[in-house]
Amino acid sequence: MNFRSLPVMCWLVLPAAFAVAAEAGEPTTFLARPAALAFADDFERTEIGDKWKTSRDEYAIKDGVFITGQLPAHGHPAVCRLSVPLRDAVVTFRFKLNGARGLTLVLNDSDWKQSHAGHICRAGVTLSGVTLGDDKEGRMKFGIYEKWKDPATKAEVERLVKDRSTSVPHALEAGKWYAMTVEFVGDEMLTSIDGRPVAYLKSPGFAHPTKNYWGFTTSGQYAEVDDLKAWHAEPDAEWPARRTKLFPAK
């Protein structure tokens, strides 16, 4: 059975056992269809390895789990990145918040010089909700970024970029494992938790053709990540009709 073809109301009431995969080895998706696998890491080792570029002393692997936490002395959240090129994609991982204020999947273009650190887009989660953000045309865009950092102009910038991000309440429990799926195709992004859609945003920066330097940013201590996978993706022809039912206000 192809669960993507089920009526929308069925998606919302499917038990978790049926909501985690549309086909063997693939995640449940709504916006995109996974194609070729681009990257996978189950963290079943003791060393982080050369593929990951991490901020100092803020990442480790223990018992097959990627553990991350911002050190109190550091003024910036903990950062890790991979050099794996994506355009349209589906990224999945399991996560647990063990004291961390938030965990964010951040996608950058290392060659893009018109936004801070080449930021393109992001999908973040806290114990209270999910946030999607267009960094390329939003807060990280040069010309906007400087004003956002300035308290005198921050309110002005908030009005300018209000359509470049969305935050959706979604209560989670500390110390509990969840599965998160982030889909981005063209100028649309959608995030699901445990196979159920939570947040959606359409914004022009998402369509940037290259996301070649991506990974996690963690605020506070600690978060745990496991079973990371990324697929190149194709548009799902059924998505426009599905979107009107799942996110009618969008």
Image (cartoon, grey):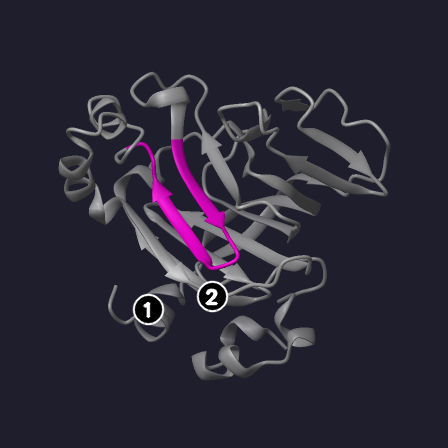
**Side of 131 relative to 176 (left or right):** left
Which quadrant of the figure has residue 57?
top right
**Side of 137 relative to 17 (left or right):** left
Q: Is residue 76 above or below residue 228?
A: above
Cα separation between marks 1 and 2: 9 Å
Residue located beneath label 1 in the image: 247
Quadrant placement of the C terminus: bottom left
Three-letter amino acid code at the position of disc 2: Pro
Magenta range? 120-136
**Would you say the magenta stretch is mainly helix, strand or loop?**
strand
Q: Residues within 10 Å of mark 2 (few under 14, many from 20)?
A: many
The label number, if any, that marks residue 142 in the structure image: none
Which residue appears at 78% of the width and 39% of the height? 43
Three-letter amino acid code at the position of disc 1: Phe
Residue located beneath label 2 in the image: 197
Which quadrant of the figure has residue 72?
top right
Is disc 1 in contact with disc 2, using a CB cutoff of under 8 Å? yes
Q: Give coordinates of residue 81: x percent, y percent.
A: 58, 27
Which residue appears at 47% of the width and 64% of the height? 30
For marks 1 and 2, the one nearer the N-term is: 2
Per the image, label 1 sits on a secondary structure element best described as loop
